[in-house]
Image: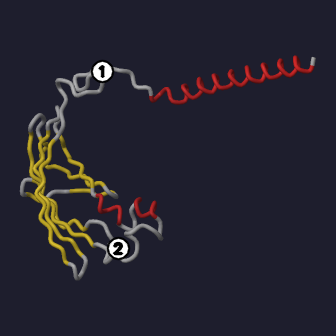
Amino acid sequence: MKFFKISVVLCFLLGHNISAQTDLVKRNTDIFSPLSIPNVQTPYRTQSGEPSSEYWQNESDYKIAVTLDDINHIVSGRVEINYTNKSPDKLDYVWLQLDQNKFNPTSRGAAITGAIGGRFSGDLDGGFNIMSVAVNGKKTRFIITDTRMQIRLDKAIQSKGGKLNIRIDYNFKIPEYG
């Protein structure tokens, strides 16, 4: 008789556990359901996510010239970017990523690394010093926010093949032992 009672209790507990797991799976599916992306065909992507007939990707070609001042630990340079807008839209501005700025003491990158740690701590007061930005030979406006630079264009880049030339003169400090 004891054996029968134990079996019934075990069956009840195991059955309850399976039910609880099924409920948990349903709840997790509900939690992540907004991330379920339906397979939708667009002019830019096939249902599998491959590029489709009207897929586009902007192009940029770089020429970079730099010098290293190993006494003062400064890299100085000029980058020239030939940019082609292949999108179906005119562009009034261009974004550039300034990864060196994560070593600026006021950056989010510095906040994450903390005061101690990381090989770039110490004498590095890092980040880019942007001396000039020119588009098609003419100085232009730009805004730098942390590791992003937005270059404002006086004249929009035309869609589907419009081109421009960006020239940036800059320098940044490097750590003595970095």
Residue under circle 1?
47
Q: Nearer the viewer, residue 67 or 94?
A: 67
Identity, as a three-letter code, of the amino acid under mark 2? Leu
Cα distance in 3D space between marks 2 and 1: 48 Å
Residue 163: quarter of image = top left
| Neighbours of disc 1 within 10 Å: few (<14), some (14-19), many (20+) | few
Image label count: 2
Q: Residue at x 12, y 65 (%)?
A: 65
As drawn, which residue projects farthest toward the bottom? 71
Describe the element under mark 2 as helix, strand or loop.
loop
Pick whichever of labels 2 and 1 is earlier in the sequence: 1
Q: Is residue 120 left or right of residue 73?
A: right
Residue 56: quarter of image = top left
Q: Position of residue 148 (x, y in %)?
A: 29, 54
As drawn, which residue projects farthest toward the left? 137
User: Is residue 158 positioned above or below 115 on the image?
Assistant: above
Residue under circle 2?
124
- Quadrant of image for the N terminus: top right
Q: Residue at x 41, y 59 (%)?
A: 108
Q: Is residue 83 left or right of residue 48?
A: left
